[in-house]
Image: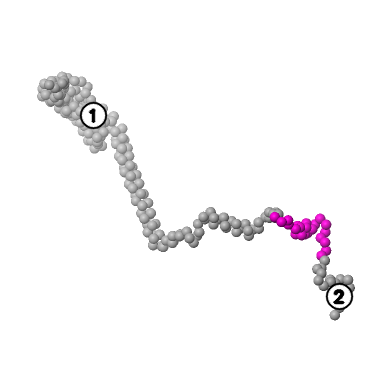
Amino acid sequence: MTDAPVGHGTPEGEEPATAPPPEGSFGEEAAEMANEPFETGAERPPQEPTEVETAWRDADASDATGMPDVEASGDPEPEDDLTRARRDLVELTTDLQRLQAEYLNYKRRVDRDRELIRENATYTALAPITEVLDTIDRAREHAPLEDGFKAVADQLERIVTSKGLTKFGEVGDPFDPTIHEALSHIGEDPDVTVTTCKVIAKAGYRIGERVVRAAQVLVVDPPFETRAERAPQEPPSGPRE
């Protein structure tokens, strides 16, 4: 057993002396602040909060602002496979019905446009031929057609008829301004009761309901007495007694 060195022991009941920190170091300032007594009623200087204190403070603030609690929010239970399949089936059926309606509308529009294009093409091709048909009609008025000219005329009329071009306008037809063009008024005729086509200058032609050319006609009116009888009787004007 070795004896403690003389002069290095600490008397009993006394605290060991600590070496003073170097002058001007951080330890010296910390020691001064720790040993500096606070006066009664003096406030401690503010200190920066630690990360743990900041986290707890944010959690308290979230509770105070009424953030929903996951457990208390009452989220609906997840859908099962059957419910999800039924919902998808309804959505797909609705989409299919909408697409089918759009396709039907498109098909009708295409068919209508195709028919209109066909009628326009037929009209463009046959409209000039009406002048040739007029020449054939005038030739028939002078004399019956014979030989090759008759065969060509008959074949041409068959072809234009097969393409939808029809002829209209006969003597005695009631005058219709939508399909007749009145070239002249030639008086009255006691044999008619309405304005009537008396002479057909040029026959009219149409394709379906579309008029290619209105019939050019001369018209006659019924006698004045007949028109007066057919006119609606107007009530007499003036105060009643």
State the mark number for residue 178: 1
Foreground of the two, 78 or 147: 78
- Measured in 3D between alpha carbons, the distance from the residue under mark 2 to the one under mark 1, in whole angstroms, is 142 Å
Q: Which residues are magenta?
A: 18-41
- The residue that mark 2 highlights is 4
Circle 2 SS class: loop
* Left or right placement of residue 151 versus residue 224 in this view: right
66 over 186 or under it: above or below: below
What is the crowding at mark 1: few (fewer than 14 residues within 10 Å), some, or many (at least 20)? few
The way the protein has been coloured in the rendering is: one colour
Whether 4 is among the magenta residues is no
Amino acid carrying mark 1 in the image:
Thr
State the mark number for residue 29: none
Q: Quadrant of residue 174?
A: top left
Provide residue 5's location: percent of width, then percent of height. 88, 73
Q: Quadrant of residue 182?
A: top left
Q: Is residue 159 visible?
A: no
